[in-house]
Image: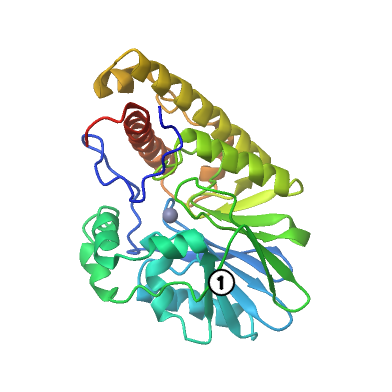
Amino acid sequence: MNVDHIPDRELAVRPDSYSGPNLSPRGLHLQPRPLADGVFALMATTPPKDNNGVIIGLRAALVVDAGITPDVSARIQGLVVELTDRPLRYLVNTTYHGDHTFGNAAFPVETTVVSSRANREAMTDLEYEKRLRSANMYGDEAMLDAVTDWRRPDVVFDGRAEIDLGGRVVELWHFGPGNGPGDTVVHVPEARIAWTGNLLCHAGIAHMLLQGGPRPYLRTLRAMRQALPELATIVPGHGPMGDAGAAIDALSVYLERLDQEVAAAVQKGRSLEETMRACTDPWAQSLDPALVTALSAYHLPPGAAEVGMRTLCQNLHRLNVLATYRLYGDSPT
Ligand SMILES: [Zn+2]
């Protein structure tokens, strides 16, 4: 059983009647939320659309993630100008996914794009990535026509890097494969805040195992906890901010169970359908109460965020079962 195999391409085959997160920028509003002096989350007012961030030092400002289209990229840059007169010198991509990187080319050349080496290496085939991301556009696929150039990171790192913004050092970490091969965490140590991209969302949200199996993902989370013991708050790429420890705990419990249940089903020779039924779906009944509270802070019709999140998590869970089943079963694609 080759449990460490990381496919180099995102799983393009989805479970039957799968629907992924709606990441269309239609109706997207990014709300700056001050978290510490010069540290702002740019929170999408409709989850799970992409969140961003701005970190400001004495000499320079840094943006976390680029937006899914050049238009979103321009809006992020407009918010930076409202928040600071420091020059925008750095843009960090937390993952290679188009909703985090398609806007890269719309940042000026003076803004250095930084990410992990693995993320950069994953950014090779714009048309393939656009096809995958089209499934997240829900009727707005044509908005991706504006994405004609996939600007890759100018500077890459392995493991850990520091960016000095003047009076403030931002740490970049790549702990290993998780959602993707190169998930990059942007850590502001003195504020005990980190942007975690697709690697880690609020406790109780399903995470996609697109390229890492449950076991490498668990190792990555252990490395993160060990490296950042003081980390308090995460700003995920999608959905509400949350407690870092609770998020790591909840995801670890989920991954351990997924690992055990799928491995057991494969060992018994169960089919994919049987495995789907045999695996616990934590979202079948309800959402984590802390997540319900976090979702209630969004100004959405009563229940809308909850119903949407539960449906999304159930879809992502089925995708995870499929991905793990194929990883452990070596089943034909
Ligand atoms: Zn994402």
**x and y percentages locating residue 50 in the rendered image:** 44, 58
In the displayed orientation, state which residue is furthest to the front: 2
Q: Quadrant of the C terminus?
A: top left
Q: Is residue 244 visible?
A: no
Image position of 196 (left or right of 276): right
Residue 258 falls left or right of residue 191: left
In this view, the residue farthest toward the top is: 268
Q: How is the image coloured?
A: rainbow
Q: Residue at x 40, y 80 (%)?
A: 106
- Assign ligand 1 to one image quadrant: bottom left
Q: Which of the two residues, 13 or 203, is positioned nearer the viewer here?
A: 13
**Lateral position of residue 200 relative to residue 29, left or right:** right
Q: Tally the numbered discs.
A: 1
Residue 267 is situated, as x and y percent measured from the top left of the image, at 37, 16
Location of residue 153 with respect to 87 vertically, above or below? above
Residue 73 drawn above or below residue 18 = below
Q: Nearer the viewer, residue 225 or 48?
A: 225
Tag 1, which secondary structure? strand
Locate residue 55, reporting x and y percent: 64, 70
Question: Is the CB of the residue bearing disc 1 within 8 angstroms of ligand 1?
Answer: no
Q: Residue at x 32, y 32 (%)?
A: 326
What residue is shown with label 1? 63
Q: Position of residue 62 (x, y in %)?
A: 60, 74
- Is residue 255 positioned above or below 142 on the image? above
Instruction: Tell me the kind of residue under disc 1.
Output: Val
Q: Residue at x 46, y 61 (%)?
A: 119
Image quarter of residue 280: top left
